Amino acid sequence: ETFTTGSCHTFLENGLPYYAKRSPKAASHTVTVRLKDGLKFRFSELAGERKTKFNIRAEFFSRSGSEQLVTELFTHILGTEKNSGVVFDIGMNLGYYTQMSAARGYQVHSFELQPFCFQFAYNAAKQNEFLDKIFPHNAPLSDKKFILKQRDSQCKSGTFDISKRETFKGKQGFTFADLETVRLDDVVNVCNIDKIALVKMDIDGAEVGALRGFLQTLEKGTVQNMILEVGS
């Protein structure tokens, strides 16, 4: 099977992914995140989000126990790797860990199913002057080739029904985008990546297909560290 390979171009080279340009524009604001080790970076979040049930803002990452742990792991691992290799942020969402990794000097390949999320990542990257460090991949990940119907034009929890090949979120009967699956091994090969310092994977149940499409890279020892969130 022949897969699309995603993009080997940064925000600076190509700007926003195609469907992100088509997404409805939302009011946002950018805040400064300061970590315990003195590192700071800008992070874009949805303005007025407190009024909604879905609430991911910068403060979420400092208050949630699991996200605090992931932040500490990022700090330790990326400090140990000393800017050698790239970071794969798989399940980027608003781009908190993407901006953090770029702030530590790494180039980041950011994978996200939801086109809308890239608006926030782009806005923050522009303020941080990280446009040349972030490679956006707006695609579902799998070892199988198929077209996924993206029914949600917002940035929420990006997951999909593998049997129906459509996103769970969004209005039924409405397709915002048709996204073709990408295999991670192909991204590594086409982008000539020889070392991945850290992989963070949080894609709400789609991990098995993504990992099956990543086996060649894992077997070669290209990946030095991995943080994988598994739901129960």
Image: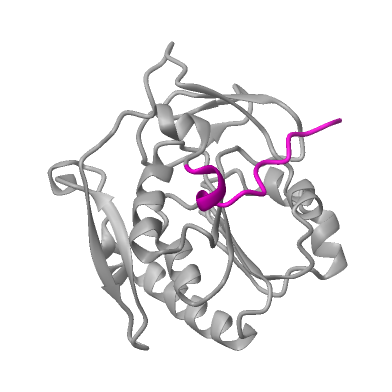
Magenta residues, start to end: 1-15
Q: Give the answer, above or below, for where 79 lies relative to 133.
A: below
Instruction: Residue at 27% x, 63% y: name it.
Output: 58
Q: Give the answer, above or below, for where 198 lies relative to 145.
A: below
Instruction: Residue at 40% x, 69% y: name it.
Output: 66
Residue 56: in sight, yes or no? no
Q: Give the answer, above or below, for where 47 lies relative to 108.
A: above
Image quarter where the N terminus lies is top right
Q: Position of residue 109 (x, y in %)?
A: 60, 56
Q: Position of residue 97 (x, y in %)?
A: 45, 64
- In this view, the residue in front, 49 or 203, is 49
- In this view, the residue in front, 130 or 150, is 130
Image quadrant of residue 40? bottom left
Q: Position of residue 202 (x, y in %)?
A: 53, 55
Instruction: Residue at 49% x, 43% y: name it.
Output: 15
Side (left or right) of 15 relative to 30: right
Image quadrant of residue 149? top right
| Residue 28 lies in the magenta-colored region | no
Side (left or right) of 194 relative to 177: right
Extreme residue toward the top, this view: 173
Residue 99: in sight, yes or no? yes
How is the rendered protein coloured?
A: one colour
| Residue 9 lies in the magenta-colored region | yes
Side (left or right) of 66 relative to 33: right
Q: Position of residue 157 (x, y in %)?
A: 41, 42
- In this view, the residue in front, 12 or 88, is 12
Q: Main secondary structure of the magenta part?
A: loop
Q: How many marks?
A: 0
